[in-house]
Image (cartoon, rainbow, N blue to C red):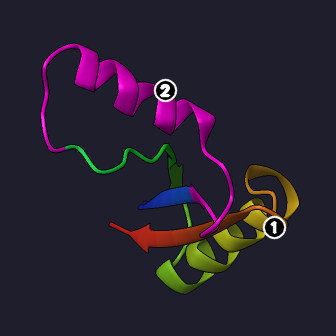
Amino acid sequence: MVKADIRIELKHGVADPEGENTRKALELLGFKGIKSVKTVKLFEVEMDAEPEEAKEAAEEMCRRLLANPVIQTFRVDLK
């Protein structure tokens, strides 16, 4: 069994209102020096496959469902 960690992030320059609101809230709670907060989605997918096949499948999952290629990037790490 192979476990794929799939990390989905917004592309550079795409607005992240959730991250910005979180940064503001942290400042209101007294946390100092926070320059930015970015939201990231992490999917952990377990598969019965060989590592190379699992990576290809995870990347296809991103292209077809998990990530929006217009505004997001993805990275797949196998465990």
Which badge, 1 or 2, comes first in the chain's sequence?
2
Q: Is residue 70 left or right of residue 51?
A: right
The residue that appears at 55% across and 86% down in the rendered structure is: 52
Local secondary structure at mark 2: helix
Residue annotated with mark 2:
21
Q: Nearer the viewer, mark 1 or mark 2?
A: 2
| Residue type at numbered disc 2 | Asn
**Can you tell which quarter of the image residue 32 is in?**
top left
In the rendered image, residue 51 lying in the magenta stretch gets the answer: no
CA separation in Å, label 1 and label 2: 24 Å
Give residue 4's position: percent from left, percent from top. Answer: 47, 61
Q: Are marks 1 and 2 in contact (CB under 8 Å)?
A: no
Give residue 73's position: percent from left, percent from top. Answer: 64, 69
- The quarter of the rendered structure image containing the C terminus is bottom left
Q: How many marks?
A: 2
In the image, the segment drawn in magenta is 9-33
Image disc number at residue 5: none
* Residue 53, placed above or below residue 75: below
Local secondary structure at mark 1: loop
- The quarter of the rendered structure image containing the N terminus is bottom left
Q: Counting other residues with Cα less than 10 Å from the Cα at mark 2, is it few (<14), some (14-19), or many (20 or more)?
A: few
| Residue type at numbered disc 1 | Pro
Of the pair 39 and 50, the residue shown nearer to us = 39
The residue that appears at 26% across and 15% down in the rendered structure is: 28
Give residue 33's position: percent from left, percent from top. Answer: 15, 44
Residue annotated with mark 1:
69
